[in-house]
Amino acid sequence: MAAAEKLALAKIGKTEPSPFAAIDFGAYAKRIVSFLARNFFTMKFIALAIAFSINVMLLFYKVIVQKSDQI
């Protein structure tokens, strides 16, 4: 009986670590930085293509002004 009480007290006294404690955020940050460094020129080219596309769209964008009869 004493052994069962001791075991029950041992279980109550222990706290489980947080699930976030098991995650190594430093390793994930290193992977992200490595990915960005490895694909730098590809992403630079994609950004250039997107900027060019936006500029072409803005170049041919036509604003229509509606005149009203109010003074």
Image: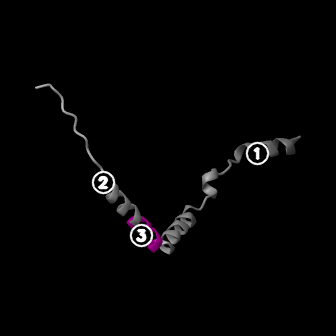
Residue wearing tag 2: 60
Question: Of the residues under marks 1 and 3, which one precedes in the sequence?
Answer: 1
**Where in the figure is residue 46, as x and y percent of width and height?**
44, 66
Q: Residue furthest right?
A: 1
Question: Of the residues under marks 1 and 2, which one precedes in the sequence?
Answer: 1
The question of residue 29 being in magenta is answered with: no
Quadrant of the rendering where the C terminus is positioned: top left
Q: Is residue 28 left or right of residue 7?
A: left
The question of residue 43 being in magenta is answered with: yes
Residue wearing tag 1: 11
Q: Nearer the viewer, mark 1 or mark 3?
A: 3
Q: Is residue 14 left or right of residue 4?
A: left
Three-letter code, disc 1: Lys
Three-letter code, disc 3: Lys
Q: Residues within 10 Å of mark 3 (few under 14, many from 20)?
A: few
* Region in magenta: 40-48
Q: Residues within 10 Å of mark 1 (few under 14, many from 20)?
A: few
Q: Are marks 3 and 2 in contact (CB under 8 Å)?
A: no
Residue 30 or residue 46, whichever sits in front: 46
Residue wearing tag 3: 44
Q: Nearer the viewer, mark 1 or mark 2?
A: 2
Distance between mark 1 and mark 2 Cα atoms: 71 Å
Q: Is residue 34 left or right of residue 50?
A: right
